[in-house]
Image: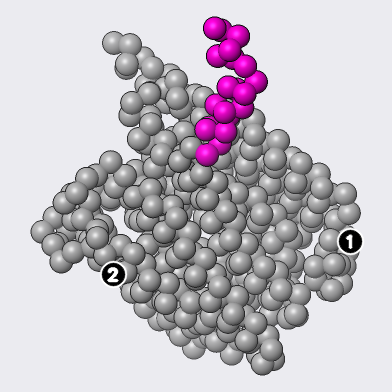
């Protein structure tokens, strides 16, 4: 009987059931979804760097760095709390929650857009005498509002485990972005500002589609608006500080390079970063699916599940990152020439150093996921404080005196500090959790 139960056919059948299980299919679709979203932006950014001069691309990279800043804030106080707090909610509570959070997102997005517009206008009048600056930042302000709105609805769908609907929304939005890019390329008006306008129009249409998709969890009941927004704030208040420090660690080198060197040098960093953005696509896809799923599972299974999850992410993820980086390092200058038509000659050393930085950047990911699931926002903050301090005290002087080489070395040191401190705080948090459960 044991022989029959463990026959090859039985094992094959069991393996197939595992492969086609809802959790595996959803996780696969989430990865495909993130691949499409990030891949579309990656391709557009790469092609923009290919067809415009490095200085113009550098201005686009600079504006996009500001857009990322506000996106980080949205992630901290709206998106991440929503994936953890919203996932376990049922029925009317879920309706009230998503309605309240939807209004909060609209207010936040509108406020951000106005801040960017006003700041850009004042800067152009008194500090930066560049028509290109005002044109790019003006369009970026509108793009920021729309991109954040679309991001809210896709994450709301992921939180409800409606991975297929989130995929459809993203796929529709990306198709519009690609169509818009082709139009401006054919018309000969390809520029950083027009790319932002394409993002704005495509995302506004996707927001309308998202409203339709979420009609069952959106109502006019705002009676608990303050309560739910307060819950999000209580969860994200440490995360917003850590996000700010994380932003400093990751983006300060763009600003330092543009300030101490040139916009073209910032364009070099942006162009090389495009090559490794594939790794960000993968981690973002994993995060989109895994946080709601793991938060639920951790409630029932506890530390055993969390340890197993982190171990799997470490082993599989690190192996994948190393394989990708090695494949790029096989011919770095050839890849730069092929992608950018020879506009970035002599920067193969930047690609090599970026590969090292990318490995350290991923090593932080499993610890970050673990701390989010344990709701140890303050520990994430502490890790980011150490890394941002490294980037400011060590990274900026390196850029000033060593140029692009110094910027890359500074990024490596910053990510190494972040990965090391995150792992340390995760270990301490898990030990504390285990001790509390044993009492």
Residue 364 x/y as whole percent: 57, 38
Which of the image's four quarters has the N terminus? Answer: top right
Q: Based on the picture, tell me whether residue 13 belongs to the magenta stretch.
A: yes
Q: Which mark is residue 107?
A: 2
Instruction: Say how the picture is coloured.
Output: one colour
The spot of residue 181 in percent (x, y) is: 62, 80
Q: Is residue 66 left or right of residue 276?
A: left
Q: Position of residue 42 (x, y in %)?
A: 64, 65
- Tell me: 247 left or right of 152: right
Q: Position of residue 342 (x, y in %)?
A: 87, 72
Q: Main secondary structure of the magenta part?
A: helix
> Farthest residue in the left direction?
223
Residue at mark 1: 334
Q: Is residue 42 above or below residue 198?
A: above
At x 64%, y 34%, the residue is 316
Give residue 305's mark: none
> Residue placed farthest to the bottom in the image?
187
Residue visible at 76% across and 75% down? Answer: 50
Query: Is 424 in front, or is 219?
Result: 219
Which residue lies at the image location 84% right of the left edge and 61% below the top edge? Answer: 335
Specify whether residue 261 is in view.
no
């Amino acid at each position: 009987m044991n022989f029959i139960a463990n026959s090859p056919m039985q094992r094959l059948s069991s393996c197939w059931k595992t492969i086609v299980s809802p959790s595996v299919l959803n996780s696969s679709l989430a990865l495909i979804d993130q691949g499409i979203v990030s891949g579309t932006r990656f391709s557009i950014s790469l092609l923009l760097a290919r067809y415009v001069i490095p200085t113009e691309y550098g201005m686009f990279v600079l504006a996009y760095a500001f857009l990322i800043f506000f996106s980080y804030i949205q992630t901290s106080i709206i998106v991440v709390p929503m994936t953890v707090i919203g996932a376990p909610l049922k029925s009317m509570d879920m309706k009230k929650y998503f309605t309240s959070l939807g209004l909060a997102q609209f207010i936040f997005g509108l406020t951000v857009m106005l801040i960017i517009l006003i700041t850009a206008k004042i800067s152009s009048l008194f500090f930066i005498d560049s028509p290109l600056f005002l044109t790019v930042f003006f369009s970026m302000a509108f793009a920021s509002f729309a991109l954040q709105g679309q991001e809210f609805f896709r994450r709301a769908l992921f939180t409800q485990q409606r991975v297929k609907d989130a995929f459809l929304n993203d796929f529709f939005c990306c198709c519009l972005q690609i169509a818009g890019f082709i139009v401006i390329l054919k018309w000969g008006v390809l520029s950083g500002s027009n790319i932002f306008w394409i993002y704005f129009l495509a995302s506004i249409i996707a927001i309308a589609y998202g409203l339709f998709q979420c009609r069952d969890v959106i109502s006019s009941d705002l009676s608990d608006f303050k309560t739910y927004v307060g819950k999000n704030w209580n969860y994200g208040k440490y995360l917003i500080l850590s996000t700010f420090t994380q932003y400093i660690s990751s983006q300060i080198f763009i600003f330092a390079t543009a300030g101490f060197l040139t916009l073209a040098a910032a364009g070099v960093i942006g162009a090389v970063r495009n090559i490794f953005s594939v790794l960000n696509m993968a981690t973002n896809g994993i995060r989109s699916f895994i946080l709601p799923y793991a938060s639920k599972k951790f409630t029932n299974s506890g530390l055993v599940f969390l340890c197993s999850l982190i171990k799997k992410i470490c082993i599989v993820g690190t192996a994948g990152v190393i394989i990708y980086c090695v494949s790029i390092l096989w011919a770095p200058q050839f890849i730069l020439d092929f992608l950018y038509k020879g506009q970035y000659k002599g920067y193969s050393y930047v690609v090599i150093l970026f590969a090292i930085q990318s490995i350290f950047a991923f090593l932080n990911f499993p610890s970050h996921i673990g701390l989010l699931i344990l709701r140890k926002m303050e520990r994430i903050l502490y890790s980011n404080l150490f890394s941002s301090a490294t980037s400011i005290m060590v990274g900026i002087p390196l850029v000033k005196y060593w140029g692009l080489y110094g910027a890359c070395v500074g990024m490596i040191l910053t990510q190494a500090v972040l990965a090391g401190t995150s792992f340390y705080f995760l270990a301490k948090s898990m030990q504390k959790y285990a001790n509390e459960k044993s009492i």
